[in-house]
Amino acid sequence: MPMLIALAISIAVLAVVATFLFLGPLAALNVQIWQAFVAWASHYHCGGKVAGTRTTIVCMSFGVVIGALSVMLAGQLGALGALAAPVAVGIGAAVIVLAAHVSLLSVIPASVYGFACVAGLILLKGMAPIDAIVPTILSVAIGAAFGFVSEAIAGMLAKKEGGAATT
């Protein structure tokens, strides 16, 4: 079957499973399905396979930490008034870009996804930045794993009917 159809089937079925897990058994861990979906997409953006999963987890986790630190910094820059958050975000963005000199952190967009995910959780749930780090990184790791599994299943489905994966 064509790879696009195989991906549609694999991702659709696994999206049902992931959503059930996040809204049900995993809900007590404060993990977020939307963060997992961002990581799932990042897996593909980072090239898929094991390398895409690894890059997603490493870069997004780095972005999570920088994002949480940026929110904390904004609180410390209160004397800047309305400029506190923008300055803190600018500093965080600069750190992410400069860190791209390290090969493990070279996919800047994935780090930005992590920054945005933790900031979103902090803002949406009113969580303390330090309390948002672990559930966000856990959501990222689970989402990246779903990306890996969805790709593997799609590859098997595409090869199953017709002997070779086609797009």
Image (tube, grey):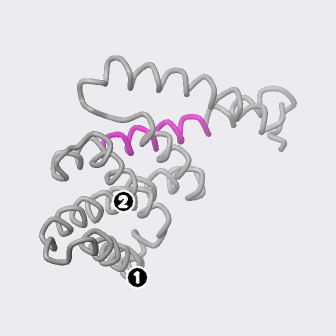
Q: Which of marks 2 and 1 is nearer the N terminus?
A: 1
Amino acid type of the residue tagged 1 in the rendering:
His
What residue would you read off at disc 1?
A: 101
Local packing at callout 1 (Cα closer than 10 Å; few below 14, some 14-19, many 20+) is few
> Can residue 38 be found in the magenta stretch?
no
What residue would you read off at disc 2?
A: 115
The quarter of the rendered structure image containing the C terminus is top right
Image check: 151 left or right of 118?
right
Query: Helix, strand, or loop for circle 2?
Result: helix
Task: Tell me where residue 74 appears, x and y as whole percent.
Answer: 21, 68
Task: Tell me where residue 124 appears, x and y as whole percent.
Answer: 32, 42
Task: Tell me where residue 65 appears, x and y as whole percent.
Answer: 26, 60
Residue 77 image label = none
Give the main secondary structure, helix, strand or loop, of the magenta stretch: helix
State the extent of the magenta-drawn residues as a range. Answer: 137-151
Q: Identify which residue, 133 or 101, lies in the foreground.
A: 133
Task: Tell me where residue 31 appears, x and y as whole percent.
Answer: 32, 34
> Can residue 144 be found in the magenta stretch?
yes
Amino acid type of the residue tagged 2 in the rendering:
Phe
Query: Does 75 sit above or below residue 128?
Result: below
Q: Nearer the viewer, mark 2 or mark 1?
A: 2
Image check: 110 left or right of 162?
left
Q: In which quarter of the image is residue 97?
A: bottom left
The quarter of the rendered structure image containing the N terminus is top right
Query: Does 44 sit above or below residue 146?
Result: below
Q: Quadrant of residue 102?
A: bottom left
